[in-house]
Image (cartoon, rainbow, N blue to C red):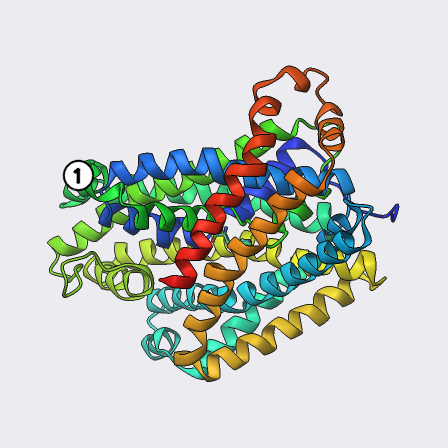
Amino acid sequence: MTSTRGEFSSRFGFIMAASGSAVGLGNIWGFPTQAAGNGGAAFLVVYLVLAFTLAYPALMAELIIGRHAHSNPVRALRTISPNPLLARLGAASGIAGLGIASLILSFYAIVAGWMIAFCLASLMDLFGAAELSAWLTSFGVVRNLLFTYLFIGLTAFIITGGVRGGIERWSARLMPVLILTLLILIAYVLTLEGATEGLKIYLLPDFSRSLSPDLILRALGAAFFSLSLGVGTMLVYGSYLSDEENLPLLGGVVTLVDIIIAVIAGFLILPAMYVALHSGVHIFNADGTLISEDTLIFTVLPELFATMRLAGVIVSITFFFLMSIAALTSSISMLEVSVAYATESRGVKRGRAALVIGCAVAAASTLIIFDFSNLFGLVITLTTRYGQPLLGFVFCLYAGWVWHRDGVLQELLKNNPEAEHGLFWRIWPWYVKFVCPVIILAIFAQAALG
Ligand code: TRP
């Protein structure tokens, strides 16, 4: 193992970095509308239960494997078993993880680029540069390429700084800004007319919808994406943790922060949509469901901001700034998976690895932008509906079946001699062995068949 491996300087640093990875576009543009359209508070309860009973154990599988190996996913999975075939399969799964993480980054960077462009567009409005603003918000190839490259450049720049000087430093700076910005926006939007109606839609429970099997599986997929599981991201972050830390506790905190931010984001998005409705903006699709995702963020909200005049320009700048930050602390965790492998297992210097892999991701994004209507949705489906659950399944198998039970316990005892008698050790090994793989397979089957 290389002695020059990075390590988070503190518990706080890890929590900022890992929750920075978890909290991203998924929390703010995905979760709130999904909840509102699927039973409100009832969806929330289902999501909460799933996050803690299934996503949290899967997160722990990655963190424990990573911290044990203090290495990148490829090497970590290769060294878990002395059996050469299992070692080779482990390494192959690690490589697949790198590929999927990079592909996720290739579409995530396009969306994040739009966030930056919209933020700048509102700034231009403030200075009266209407033409430039219109260009920034129009869907053109040049604009898309430019801002995707800019975003990947920022991501690679932070990764070049290393674990402490890059990932930890920037996550610890940006996450508090993100939380503060979110709270300020909520406080403002809640004072506007129509806001309470949105809150009602968000919070009134309707259990008839949230308990359908299809929805439960969808909620679980969303939880996996939101906690950055199944590509080795959390495994890599776990590998930068010191042996002193209490893993079950840290994993719990990260899960909680991710959920809380998703729930809080609903207090912004739903009221904002009903404020928009109040100002005459359409917020429903033809079939009566709430408009969500890209149309919500890039059409409904900008229309709302436009009705608010000067205040709207400032709220718009703040909102898209918030989205850009949320995306950036997530994208660095995607790039780090491959960079960790290139530096440790291939002996490439960190800066060069970030540059080369960043360029490869940018090339993939370029292809997607040129054939947007075919490739964008395809890459999202392949990576998040198939790739993530399948690899999440493999990680659970390695933590539950391949890795010897004593080895796992030793890892947990490192920081917590009481662990053997704790609730976590009594439940988790069974969970990760039986329950997690079965449920993940169910998600996968549903994705494959449906
Ligand atoms: N969790 C992030 C979000 O909610 C996205 C993300 C970061 C991610 N790293 C990942 C998703 C790894 C899948 C795999 O937006």
**Left or right position of 54 against 103:** left
Q: Which residue is pictured at 75% across the width and 65% down the height?
A: 353
Q: Amino acid at mark 1?
A: Lys
User: In front here: 102 or 174?
Assistant: 102
x and y percent of residue 404 in the render?
A: 74, 35
x and y percent of residue 28 in the render?
A: 38, 50
- Judging by the rendered image, the residue that carries numbered circle 1 is 200
**Left or right position of 38 against 178:** left
Indicate if the residue with disc 1 has its beta carbon within 8 Å of ligand 1: no
- Residue 21, compared with residue 384, is above or below; it is above
**Left or right position of 7 against 20:** right
Q: Quadrant of residue 314?
A: bottom left
The answer to whether residue 240 is seen in the rendering is no
User: In front here: 320 or 99?
Assistant: 99
x and y percent of residue 376 in the render?
A: 44, 73
Q: Which residue is pictured at 27% across the width and 54% down the height?
A: 311
The answer to whether residue 318 is seen in the rendering is yes
- Residue 249, compared with residue 103, is above or below; it is above
- Residue 376, compared with residue 246, is above or below; it is below
Q: Which residue is pictured at 59% across the width and 63% down the height?
A: 100
**Left or right position of 223 against 32:** right
Q: Quadrant of residue 300?
A: bottom left
x and y percent of residue 226 in the render?
A: 47, 48
| Quarter of the figure with the C terminus | bottom left
How many residues crowd mark 1 within 10 Å: few (<14), some (14–19), many (20+)?
some
Q: Which residue is pictured at 63% across the width and 65% down the height?
A: 99
- Residue 198, compared with residue 406, is above or below; it is below
Q: Secondary structure at mark 1?
A: helix
User: In front here: 169 or 106?
Assistant: 106
